[in-house]
């Protein structure tokens, strides 16, 4: 359909949208597959199974009665007092902290991670310094100095779209992936599973200086909306549990964790990713 000379040119795990599919070609592919297999297929086929590997697994299951590579998980309601196990953690904190072990050590040492403003945020540091009363008077804070380091291709995101994404979204993708790996779970195996995503986040103002860039407006709509955070995570991993973004200011992390535990106990999902960010004004 896309004019490639052989299937070897296409990676089985690459999303159809990254191959160049749009709504029209997605429906056309569904129609051709329906005609060749003699099976009625949903119009959302390409979106429900966004890679050729996932789609092949679905078709094999439908036509041959074989189980898909990622079996669907049926959520079962459990007792309301059943303990919840935390099996993996991913994190980023000021002071270069990137693992739970480093965080515990930071707390044990009582270290101070308040430092100077980062130099890679596009801020006019000279103007800030002048407005603050000269050298050494500029505000300081606890910053994630590597927040601008992100591998968009790893998550199937174009570099152009990555520039419009609030750092909250990028950090969510990275830390969630790391939490699953630390738990010994292959993130790719969760596709189609009843895994929920609960994210506490708030609007950060990121992207305001790019609002006049007409070429980026489509990406800015999703890249700067905090409500998209949970949905983006679910889409990237192909999760089919609840996806909820909440903003209750400083309590967002606790609310996200509470909702995740509640969903697990009620049987809405069998595994949950709970995430949030912590924020304090610089000093």
Image (tube, rainbow, N blue to C red):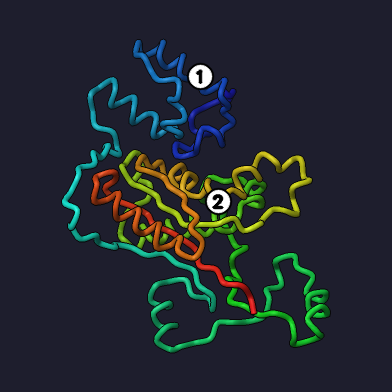
Of the two numbered discs 1 and 2 on the same chain, state the one appearing first in sequence: 1
What residue lies at 23% left-to-right and 28% top-to-bottom?
Answer: 66
Q: Where is residue 242 drawn, in percent x and y?
A: 37, 43
Badge 1 marks a residue whose secondary structure is helix
Q: Are marks 1 and 2 in contact (CB under 8 Å)?
A: no
SS label for mark 2: helix
Q: Which residue is mark 1?
A: 27
- Quarter assignment of residue 254: bottom left
Against 31, residue 20 (above or below) is: below
**Which quadrant of the view contains residue 21?**
top right
Residue at 58% x, 24% y is 2
Q: Residue at x 81, y 78 (%)?
A: 131
Say which of 160 and 268 sits in front: 268
The vertical placement of 18 against 257, above or below, is above
Distance between mark 1 and mark 2 Cα atoms: 30 Å
Comparing labels 1 and 2, the label whose residue is closer to the camera: 2
Mark 2 packing: few (<14 Cα in 10 Å), some, or many (20+)?
A: many
Looking at the rendered image, the quarter that the N terminus falls into is top right
The residue indicated by pointer 2 is 226
Label 1 crowd bin: few (<14), some (14–19), many (20+), radius 10 Å = some
Residue drawn at 38 percent across, 46 percent down: 188
Count of picture labels: 2
Q: Residue 93 shows which numbered tag? A: none
Judging depth in this view, the residue of 31 and 77 nearest the camera is 77
For the residue pair 12 and 258, the one nearer the viewer reads as 258
> Does residue 100 lie above or below 57 as drawn?
below
């Amino acid at each position: 359909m896309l004019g490639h000379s052989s299937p070897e040119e296409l990676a089985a795990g690459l999303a159809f949208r990254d191959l160049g599919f749009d709504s029209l070609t997605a429906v056309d592919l569904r129609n051709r597959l329906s005609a060749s297999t003699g099976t009625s297929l949903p119009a959302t086929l390409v979106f429900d199974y966004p890679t050729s590997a996932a789609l092949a697994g679905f078709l094999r299951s439908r036509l041959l009665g074989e189980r898909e590579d990622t079996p669907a998980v049926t959520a079962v309601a459990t007792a309301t007092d059943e303990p919840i196990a935390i099996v993996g953690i991913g994190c980023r904190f000021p002071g270069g902290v990137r693992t739970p072990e480093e965080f515990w050590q930071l707390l044990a040492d009582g270290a101070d991670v308040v430092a100077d403003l980062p130099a890679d945020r596009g801020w006019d540091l000279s103007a800030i310094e002048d407005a603050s009363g000269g050298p050494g008077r500029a505000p300081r804070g606890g910053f994630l100095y590597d927040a601008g380091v992100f591998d968009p291709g790893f998550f199937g995101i174009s570099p152009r779209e990555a520039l419009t994404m609030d750092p909250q979204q990028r950090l969510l993708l990275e830390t969630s992936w790391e939490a699953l790996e630390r738990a010994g779970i292959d993130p790719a195996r969760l596709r189609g599973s009843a895994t929920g995503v609960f994210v506490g986040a708030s609007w950060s103002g990121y992207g305001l200086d790019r609002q006049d860039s007409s070429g980026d407006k489509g990406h800015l709509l999703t890249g700067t909306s905090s409500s998209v955070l949970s949905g983006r995570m679910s889409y990237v991993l192909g999760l089919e549990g609840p996806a909820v973004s909440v903003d209750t200011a400083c309590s967002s992390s606790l609310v996200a964790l509470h909702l995740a535990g509640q969903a697990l106990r009620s049987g809405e999902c069998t595994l949950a990713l709970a995430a949030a960010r912590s924020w304090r004004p610089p000093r």
